[in-house]
Amino acid sequence: MTDAPVADLILHGGTVLTMEADQPRAEAIAVAAGRILAVGDDASVLALAGPATTRIPLQGRTLLPGFIDAHGHFANALQVVTWANIQRPPAGPVDSIASLQQVLREHVARHPVQPGDWVVAYGYDPDGLADGRPLDRADLDPLFPDNPVMVIHNSNHGAVLNSRALALVGYDANTPDPAGGVIVRRPGSREPAGLVMETAFLPLFVHMPQPSEQERLERFAQAQELYTRQGITTAQDGATAAADLGLFQTAARQGRLSIDLVLLPLVLEVPGMLKERFPDFHGDTLELPQPARDAFGHYDDHLKLQGIKLLVDGSPQGKTAFWSEPLLTPGPNGEDNWRGQPLFPPEVLNDTVARLSAQGLQLFAHCNGDAAIAMMIEACRRAGLTAGQDHRTVIVHSQFMAPGQLEQYVELGLHPSFFTVHAFFFGDTHVANLGLERASGLSPMASAMALGLHCTNHNDFSVTPIEPMRMVETAMTRRSRSGVVLGESERVSAEAALRALTIEAAWQLREESSKGSLAPGKRADLVILDRDPTATPPEQLNAIGVVATFKDGVCVYGDPAGTTTGAAA
């Protein structure tokens, strides 16, 4: 006869949203050794208490599974703590070129730089400037003449550079646009205006000078708090560079990870990773040696390699996505009938998908426009992928889909990670570029769920702030800043929106058996909110506060006994 199990921790007296279909709501939860021991009513769960059990009354508040970052860039979290925030309200303070310049001056006053040091800002939104024109390098040159300046576009796919930075990277009037990239020129001239996008920007961003490894390691606690203070217990680095892989592994070995971190090596960086870690390997750069393949799919000290990140097109708000029909507005350099462009030719994508999928590697493909989505669908079809294989290929963003493409997802076993906060942050821009009808097809979550696809939702930090409740709100309302509703028929319920942040996100990472819902045996990744999001008007969701966040049964943020932190804190 065995002794009855005894809980280490019991949380009781509130609303428990389990994300489990057979028991969606409960009153209490018991935890033992970092795992969920029981979920149920107060009486049955409290019966598992022993003399040493910690009991935390929820006091009517709401407990959910810890939120899972379905797509974002944790590496940016290590950077933004020292970058200037130039986002437009409500995410930042900038609404004009003058206010952007002032933020940069104040930032450098707080974080002094030496001559030659980079000055970096993030969140530049050309559509949010009252000046009615985009930022030019001449707006940046007088500020810090001895420093290269990089003002990162809100898509994270480009940046405005000052003249010193342009000279450092060798861009001038004689520099051609690289394949798949854009160097924006001054009107009537070949002179760079400052903005560079896609393949003109990516190498610069990936390989820009970094602080020392020790400095970056010391930022891990601060970076992780950006996530835990929002209830996130699993973060993602959705395009890991070779230079960052060793840093993440060192942080894990040193015990610096308090939450789980999932890495998706960027396909362009895979050759560098192989060269560094397997110097004797001389095979094809997309044919991973067996030890490299074996490194995927399991955690070591809270760190996991999950799959390979592919880039198919660019950004819709940056006009570098790839559409089948032209925009209603000119392209980045004033082009008529602009449809954007893919980053790589179809034959390159076809070959890449075939090689990587044949090795059993999970693929995560960035696709925004319907033409890019069509390219990825065709590449998967040519590679012989089918739904029955359970390969779980994720199409990240899946923003503007053509009729019939969701049905092709079902056929091939592709699943979308949507980006519904685009409706709020960039919806009015999409209406201007695409018209209301096309813009209303953004992130078709209701249609995808009706077809049985495993849909997630994401913030793509640092493109938009880490705000799980705004993801829920925008999935429910699909309202732009000006109040325009983009696709009323694609609205979903609060329960469905929450599943996209929990159990569905766990499924896309092949962790549904251990995370994403509250059931006995699963990891005790939990978040306590001060209100029930399923009983809160959508317009008030982003004001919900995080009381506490638990990872494997240990409180990693907040005060579960009482103090609430605001969502925007």
Image (cartoon, rainbow, N blue to C red):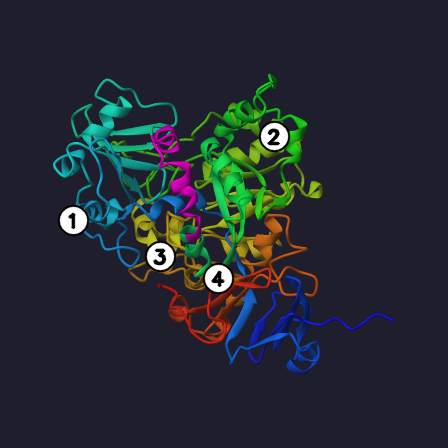
Given this view, does label 3 or label 2 mark the residue nearer the observer?
A: 2
Q: Which sits earlier in the primary sequence, circle 2 or circle 4?
A: 4
- Between 52 and 405, the residue placed more toward the observer is 52
Q: Which sits earlier in the primary sequence, circle 3 or circle 1?
A: 1
* Amino acid carrying mark 1 in the image: Gln
Reading the image, the residue beneath label 3 is: 424
Residue at image point 57% right, 48% down: 302
Reading the image, the residue beneath label 1 is: 102
Element under disc 3: helix
Magenta-colored span: 201-221
**Marks 3,2: beta carbons within 8 A:** no
CA gap, disc 3 to disc 2?
35 Å
Q: Which sits earlier in the primary sequence, circle 3 or circle 4?
A: 4
Q: Which sits earlier in the primary sequence, circle 1 or circle 2?
A: 1
CA gap, disc 1 to disc 2?
47 Å
Tell me residue 16's x, y (percent): 58, 73
Reading the image, the residue beneath label 4 is: 231
Tell me residue 11's x, y (percent): 59, 74
* Amino acid carrying mark 2 in the image: Leu
- Is residue 367 found inside the magenta-colored segment of the image? no
Q: Is residue 486 left or right of residue 57?
A: left
Residue at image point 47% right, 25% down: 345
- Quadrant for residue 326, please give it: top left
CA gap, disc 3 to disc 1?
26 Å
